[in-house]
Amino acid sequence: MLFLKRFRRKKKLSLASKILIGMLLGLLIGFLIKKLPSSIFIDKYIINGALDIIGKMFIRLLVMLVVPVVFVSLVCGTCSLGGGKKLGRLGIKVIGLFIATTIAAISIALFFANVFRVGAGKTIPHLAKFTVEHQLSIKQTILTLIPNNPVAAMAHGNLLQIIIFAILVGIAISISGRAGKHIAEIFNQFNVVLMKLIDIVMWTAPYGVFCLIVVAFANLGMDLIKDLSVYIMVVIAVLAVQLFGIYSLLLLFLAKLNPLPFFRKMYSVMLFAFGTSSSNATIPLNLEVTENNLGVDPSTTSFTIPLGATINMDGTAMMQGVAAVFIAHVYHISLSFMTYIGIVATATLASIGTAGVPSIGIITLAMVLRQAGLPISGIGLIIGVDRILDMARTVVNISGDAVTACIVSKSEKQLNQKTYNSITQN
């Protein structure tokens, strides 16, 4: 009996395995449904009915966690860092790495897009309807960083404003003496409760991912994928270079860490990000894995991961670079060296403040195209396949946050290398 109990315990599937099974089943069933003759009942009541409802309910559960997790974790992280030199040093390192990796990402994307001449020789098909919302000026963007009303910022999910407010609250707590220590303890206890809530929501992850994948692939035509095959392959290729190449080199040379344990332990987070297509929704799991399995100090994790989900979008920047070159080639527009420099700068700035929600990159792409003098209507060329590419670039977005957390924690001599290198996961 004891042997059977141990055997059953060992055979218990991990969350990552369950998510992978849900994702693969979703892919299979989605493609099979697409091959079946069109059925109003299946399309309306199964795909875009029951499965779509379950998938969106799962996303809403995740989004429900975002604001409290970001606010509480950032307050806890800032409190533990203190309001002095350590916070400033950590902030410079984290933001510096975020900007550097984003510039590298967009540069790689532009290089590959030109080498493979994505979009060259294509004719302009019927464009999907796409409208651009009013873009804020640089002055307005800077002013909107400071919340007039923190409660309203939380109600509307304005993460940049929430981050600014949380950091200020954390600094104030850290310099408030005895009263500050009491409030800090309350936030730490609240953070423990939130982690348990995350565990509850994560239990539904395999089912939510299954429904999201079925709906995405059942509604995506194979003909559309074939027409844009070169564009799709180049985007996936540059994302792979960033994920497995650039991030591995950063871990190896900046932190002297073996990249293999990182990818092995981030496996479940990457699958989750792929299934949800949301950096924000992945914050809770990313926090848990980075701290417990990669050995990153909690103060670094709670500061870096929520901040990165808002201002570090390497995957999104790469898509925008490839898309800009693709649209330029389709419309037979030549891009000068200075235009490429402008694309790098604009894509980097656009990634800062980009909401970590599905397909938001297609919206900020309008800013990049406008700066480069390219027709915004060209977004209609790629919007049909953006949902599947959004899954892949979200993996890069969240992985970049965890890489930065590992590097910064190691530089601060706070990384538990025994945990990082261990074979087992907590």
Image (spheres, helix red, strand yellow):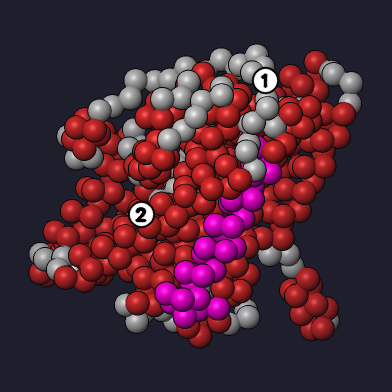
Name the residue type under label 1.
Thr
> Could you tell me the amino acid type at mark 2?
Ile
Magenta stretch holds residue 248: yes
Q: Please provide the residue range marked out in magenta.
A: 231-258
Query: Is there any visible trace of residue 268 in the rendered image?
Result: yes
Q: Between residues 357 and 378, which one lies in front from this camera angle?
A: 378
The image quadrant where one finds the N terminus is: bottom right
Vertical order, 194 against 336 (above or below)? below
Per the image, label 1 sits on a secondary structure element best described as: loop
Query: In front here: 95 or 373?
Result: 373
The spot of residue 177 in percent (x, y) is: 10, 69
Name the residue located 61 percent from the left edge and 16 percent from the top edge. 127
- Please name the residue shown 47% across and 58% down the image: 400
**How crowded is the residue under tag 2: few (<14 C-alpha within 10 Å), some, or many (20+)?**
some
Q: Is residue 192 above or below residue 415?
A: above
Q: Main secondary structure of the magenta part?
A: helix
Residue at image mark 2? 99
Return the x and y of residue 194 as percentages of the image width and height: 42, 56
Mark 1 or mark 2, which is nearer to you?
A: 1
Q: Which mark is residue 123?
A: 1
